[in-house]
Amino acid sequence: MPSLIDIRRRIRSVKNTQQITKAMKMVSAAKLRRAQDRTIAARPYGTLLRKVLGNVAAAVANDESGAENPLLARREERRILLVLITGDKGLAGAFNTNLIKAATRFVNEHQGAQITFELIGRKGRDFFRKREVAISGEAIGLAAKVKYEDTAAIARRAMQMFRDEQIDAVYLVYNEFKSVVSQKMTLSRVLPAELPEDSAPIDYIFEESPAEMLNVLLPKYVEMEFYRALLESAASEHAARMTAMDAATSNAAEMIDKLTLYMNRVRQASITKEIIEVVSGAAAAE
Amino acid sequence: MAETLELEVATPERELVREQVSEVQLPGKNGYLGVLPGHAPLLGLLGIGTLTYVAGGTTRYLSIHDGFLEILDDHVRVLADCAERAEEIDIERARRALERSQQEAINPALGVEPAQAMAAVMRAEARLTTAQKK
């Protein structure tokens, strides 16, 4: 039976852990709010861009001179760039593990293809750097403060590789933010780009030729996809951490209760033992 | 015909304007465009300059550069890489940025691409002009 002091020590240690997890939960909640605000702020641009792109696409489809845009080129997917967006930190439940598992599964499913990784986030990078895979680039510390410029640079690099026909397709793997308790692992193809289907073409006056417009719009659209994925991932990470830390805090509370009960029992037992000793000692003296 | 048109201005990071306006002037790539309700549909690229709009009798200014514009009968959509309200611009900082970019433009030793430096000068000038209009 452990001594009273040992149990007290354990209780204190669990309490300390609980304080940390509680603080982390609070911090994550605050960060989650900010991340969510950013995601919401980015939405109007995305929606508008899709609308405009849809209208331009319709116009280009009707335009005989509209040359095929290189970003729409469909090729057999033999060389794939997989962009994996993980978090920079752990302690967020299954957030990173799920992504890494999904990426590994993707590699297994595409045995015939040559897969290159673009790793965003420390966790994914650390995992795949130790494995024998081709890596085209890595970025760390983006999720802490997602900036459009940083993500756009990565998107532009991917587009350049695609245009140069070094790769045939680009996929994004990330966690999509559904709600605070649910983050959905998402695998989506960004290149070759898919033009939004739209209603009847409007008879526009074009300042530039439709093909030229598409040339400028499409890269923006792809950049925006990357940016959105990163924002979603950042919000998901904070949400996942919040949930994980909440669970850890209540587990700690449960453990403290159990240990306290156990401690009281041990104390009771030792008191009882002492009484018995005194009583039997007195009885023997008679 | 509609009396007003809906103006939407957004950048990747936020939405700046979504309101009913009676008149918009905005910098196209090949010069300024004035838009009134009932304009013919138009698609174009955005230049560098000041977007002016009149909503409910008051005139407002935005500094804006690079992006797209779409004009429909009752709608103006502006997707800018960068946009700021005139009130938000710090004139002192804008002036310093202008001076710095001018230095970079005339002094190649500073290692900035001439074309980029010129674009930076134009952006800085546009911001300053916008800021002074408010």
Image (spheres, grey):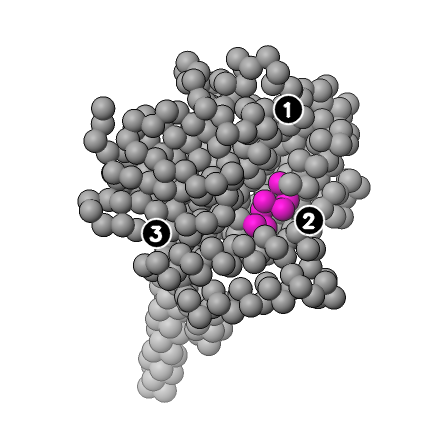
Mark 2: few, some, or many residues within 10 Å (few <14, many ≥20)?
some
Q: Could you give the CA–CA distance between mark 1 and mark 3, rounded to whole angstroms? A: 36 Å
Q: Is residue A205 left or right of residue B74?
A: right
Instruction: Tell me residue A244's x, y (percent).
Output: 45, 51
Q: Is residue A230 left or right of residue B61?
A: right
Task: Give the number of the disc on residue A171.
Answer: none
Residue at 39% x, 30% y is B71
Q: Chain of mark 1?
A: A
Question: Which quadrant holds the C terminus of chain B?
Answer: bottom left
Q: Which residue is mark 2?
A: A138
Mark 3: few, some, or many residues within 10 Å (few <14, many ≥20)?
many
Earlier residue among tags 1 and 2: 1
Q: Secondary structure at mark 1?
A: loop
Instruction: Tell me residue A16's x, y (percent).
Output: 45, 69
Q: Which residue is mark 1?
A: A69
Q: Quadrant of residue B85?
A: bottom left
Q: Secondary structure at mark 2?
A: strand
Membership of A216 in magenta stretch: no
Task: Give the number of the disc on residue B61.
Answer: 3
